[in-house]
Amino acid sequence: TCADQPTIANSSLEPAGRPKSAQSRIFIKNGLIVNDDQSFHADIYIEDGIIKQVGTNLVIPGGARTIDARGKLVMPGGIDTHTHMQMPFMGTVAIDDFYSGTKAALAGGTTMIIDFVIPQKNESLLDAYEKWRGWADAKVCCDYGLHMAVTWWSPEVAKEMEILCADKGINSYKVFMAYKDSMMLEDPEIYSCFKKCKELKALPMVHAENGHLIDIKSKELLEKGITGPEGHAQCRPVEVEEEACTRAVTIADQANSPLYIVHVMSKPSANVVAKARREGKIVFGEPIAAGLGTDGTHQFNKCWRHAAAHVMGPPLRPDPSTPEYLMDLLANNDLQVTGTDNCTFNADQKALGKDNFTKIPNGVNGVEDRMSVIWEKGVYSGKMDPCRFVAVTSATAAKLFNIYPKKGRIAVGSDADIVIWNGEETRTISAKTHHQAVDFNIFEGMTVHGVPEYVITGGSIVMDEGQLKVTQGLGRFVPTPPNSQYVYGRIATREKAREPVKVDREAYTGPVVEVENAQ
Ligand code: URP
Ligand code: ZN
Ligand code: ZN
Ligand code: ZN
């Protein structure tokens, strides 16, 4: 066991409760409604999972549950753009499944996750999609969407992307520049994939790290006898992430596709995103809760378990000023949106790499604590206002993945996914009290301002005065249609403006040198 983490009573897997029927009508009064572009005092009336009225002096039908939100913020529920629930990975399966993972999400004020379908090399994308739907549909306590990972490339993959876009509600495709020999694509394949995304008006995403360098450098460290978790960060320094970010931005620009860089973990890669955007490239950067809330010094901790618990890729950076730097860029729209990359493994699973850091399953928690960590380090620190908080925790995600304003906004007609937030209240994060299945929390001991007092998902109150009551299978799959205007608004015109030039001229009629055995 790790001395810094509590021993856990296994209480987080109790059976789920049913929501009360009166919850189909909810009246939220006296709160401050916060959207990404404005905040205002108004009341909200919800019926059958939809926001029906927003305003003052509303006429409300009888039988509604009334919640007094005076002094509280009423915000769209969080959207976590990046999770891996029960993901089969590195010889094991992530311990938080679609039940415990979405339950934890709701406990923290997140009402939608977007998870990744990860096909094996040569596996049909459609088959993998059905597998993930099968796992998730039965278990999710909140709505969810799916991204598709493109882990191999062929004309059949391109065909399946067409079907996924047209019929299956997938508009985002992630390629890996790392994980050599399992998921990594080479540059020409990445170019083809980005081109296909552009044709389908889908959003390409990238895990940007140079997989060849990681492969070489991790072997060098192992040969030197560095087998512990500290080897993980040292085999892939910031330059390895920065180089891949630059390469991905270049490839996307040449394909005239947009680009979404997942888990931006370092200062130089955040700078790559910011610079690309200043140059007019259509690039979006996603820092994650882990990278904003803690740092990579823990990988050098004397306790093996503690160090291994912080292993994820790209690594948390040993430079302790990185989290604040990433938050500053997020606050100022150099970075746009936040996820968690929640991909959790218990101590015995991490121990698969006890003698070799390259075998430690990569991943950390975050889905439960993202909202509070960003409130604490972003809003409470004075870097961002509550509107910006909504932008980076839900609204921008909804725009990027083309489900706005159904999600990510408090407005008439939007889904009733709402968090009533007490920005002054504090709680201390601990694995002892969290709702995730995993036995470790990378934010252990951190006291954060910002506590969800009520969480409403699809019109059901699942956090009620701080009490969590979720229902397994209550969430639904949310299709993400292609051609988000937030992403694609400029692409077609750019394509025209960038048409290659052909010069009409007389044919050359002079002599041509003779070449023997030209190669
Ligand atoms: O360490 C990580 N990030 N695990 C999940 C897989 C990925 O690369 O997103
Ligand atoms: Zn420890
Ligand atoms: Zn990744
Ligand atoms: Zn991930």
Image (spheres, rainbow, N blue to C red):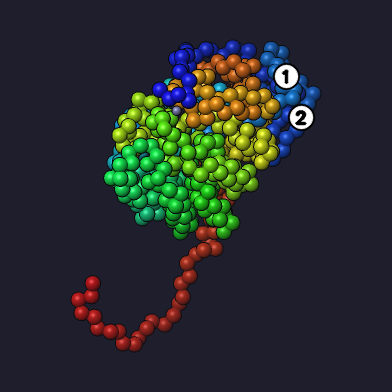
Q: Earlier in the sequence, mark 1 or mark 2?
A: 2
Q: Is residue 423 visible?
A: yes
Q: Quadrant of the C terminus?
A: bottom left
Q: From the top left corner, tell me how far across and down residue 59 is, in percent.
A: 76, 20
Q: From the top left corner, tell me how far across and down residue 453 is, in percent.
A: 64, 21
Q: Residue furthest right?
A: 57
Query: Can you tell which quarter of the image residue 127 is in?
Result: top left
Query: Can you tell which quarter of the image residue 508 is in?
Result: bottom left
Residue identified by numbered label 2: 41
Is residue 100 or residue 436 the one in the foreground?
A: 436
Local packing at callout 1 (Cα closer than 10 Å; few below 14, some 14-19, many 20+) is few
Q: Quadrant of the N terminus?
A: top left
Q: From the top left corner, tell me how far across and down residue 70 is, in percent.
A: 75, 22
Side of 286 relative to 208 (left or right) = right
Labels 1 and 2 touching (C-beta < 8 A): no
Query: In this rendering, is residue 434 above or below 494?
Result: above
Query: In this rendering, is residue 420 above or below 145?
Result: above
Residue identified by numbered label 1: 68
Residue at point 60% right, 35% down?
Answer: 374
User: Could you tell me the amino acid type at mark 2?
Assistant: His
Q: Residue furthest front?
A: 302
Query: Is ligand 4 less than 8 Å from the beta carbon at label 1?
Result: no
Question: What is the distance, in whole Å, between disc 1 and disc 2 at their CAs?
Answer: 13 Å
User: Could you tell me the amino acid type at mark 1?
Assistant: Asp
Residue at point 36% right, 47% down?
Answer: 214
Residue at point 46% right, 72% down?
Answer: 502
Is residue 343 or residue 154 the one in the foreground?
A: 343
Q: Which mark is residue 442?
A: none
